[in-house]
Image: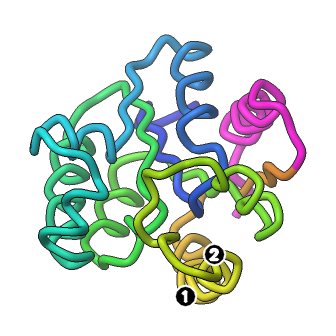
């Protein structure tokens, strides 16, 4: 990889950002961070609690601050939250300070991967599938707008996804 050694993983919840990020960091001998874990570390409370007390707007402010701090680091792989791309300043920071990788996944795969988790306040609804569709319709164009590389994750093993990302990031850019 040329230029910045930072890799930022974006994509919807359940796309595998954390698992793939950890694998990439191991393979590249970089440090891994998850922006949601960083927010929890900074606040001392979990994400659902922040949503309950501050709403999504409060959470997004905390996410913005965490992403600002994490993107100032060097030699890192960062898994962002699914909604990190909603703020213009986050998209600018991510795209300017490293290689952005969009982990693309379908709604069915997201439902399967998120059904047992209780750490996803946006899915505290009677119809998680409808919510995921709504989120994807708004966020997919934002993911695509800053991605240097897009990799499908549906039905794939973490190592295969990580290997494909490494291959794509090493390929020369054709202009």
As drawn, the label of residue 107 is none
Query: How far across and how far down the image is residue 5, in percent?
Result: 44, 31
Would you place residue 113 above or below residue 126 in this image?
above
Q: Nearer the viewer, mark 2 or mark 1?
A: 2
Q: Given the current orientation, which residue lies at the most extreme front position?
A: 126
Neighbourhood count class around disc 1 (C-alpha, 10 Å): few under 14, some 14–19, many 20 upward: few
Q: Position of residue 173 (x, y in %)?
A: 69, 51
Quarter of the image for residue 143 reads bottom right
**As displayed, is residue 156 above or below residue 137?**
above
Q: Residue tagged by mark 1?
A: 138
Left or right, 24 with reference to 83: right
Q: Which residue is drawn at 63% across and 33% down?
A: 20
Looking at this view, is 91 or 39 the one in front? 39
Residue shown at the point (55%, 13%) measured from the top left: 26
Question: Which residue does the numbered mark 2 point to in the structure image?
Answer: 128
Front position in the image: 43 or 9: 43
**Which of the image's four quarters has the N terminus?**
top right
**Is 145 within the magenta?**
no
Q: How far apart are marks 2 and 1 (CA)?
A: 16 Å
The quadrant of the picture occupied by the C terminus is bottom right
- State the image quarter where residue 13 is shown: bottom right
Q: Is residue 6 left or right of residue 104?
A: left
Magenta-colored segment: predominant secondary structure: helix
Element under disc 2: helix
Q: Nearer the viewer, residue 85 or 3?
A: 85
Residue 92: percent from the left, percent from the top? 32, 68
What are the residue bounds of the magenta stretch?
155-175
């Amino acid at each position: 990889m040329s230029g910045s050694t930072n890799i930022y993983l974006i994509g919807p919840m359940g796309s595998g950002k954390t698992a793939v990020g950890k694998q990439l960091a191991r393979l590249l001998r970089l440090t891994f961070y998850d922006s949601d874990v960083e927010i929890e570390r900074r606040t001392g409370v979990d994400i659902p609690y922040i949503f309950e007390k501050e709403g999504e707007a409060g959470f997004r402010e905390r996410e913005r601050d965490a992403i600002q701090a994490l993107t100032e680091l060097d030699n890192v792989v960062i898994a962002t939250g699914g909604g990190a791309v909603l703020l213009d300043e986050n998209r600018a920071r991510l795209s300017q300070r490293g290689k952005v990788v969009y982990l693309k996944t379908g709604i069915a795969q997201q439902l399967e991967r998120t059904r047992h988790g209780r750490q996803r306040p946006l899915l505290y609804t009677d119809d998680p599938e409808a919510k995921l569709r709504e989120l994807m319709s708004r966020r997919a164009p934002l993911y695509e707008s800053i991605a240097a590389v897009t990799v499908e994750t549906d039905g794939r093993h973490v190592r295969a996804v990580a290997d494909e990302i490494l291959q794509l990031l090493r390929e020369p850019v054709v202009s």
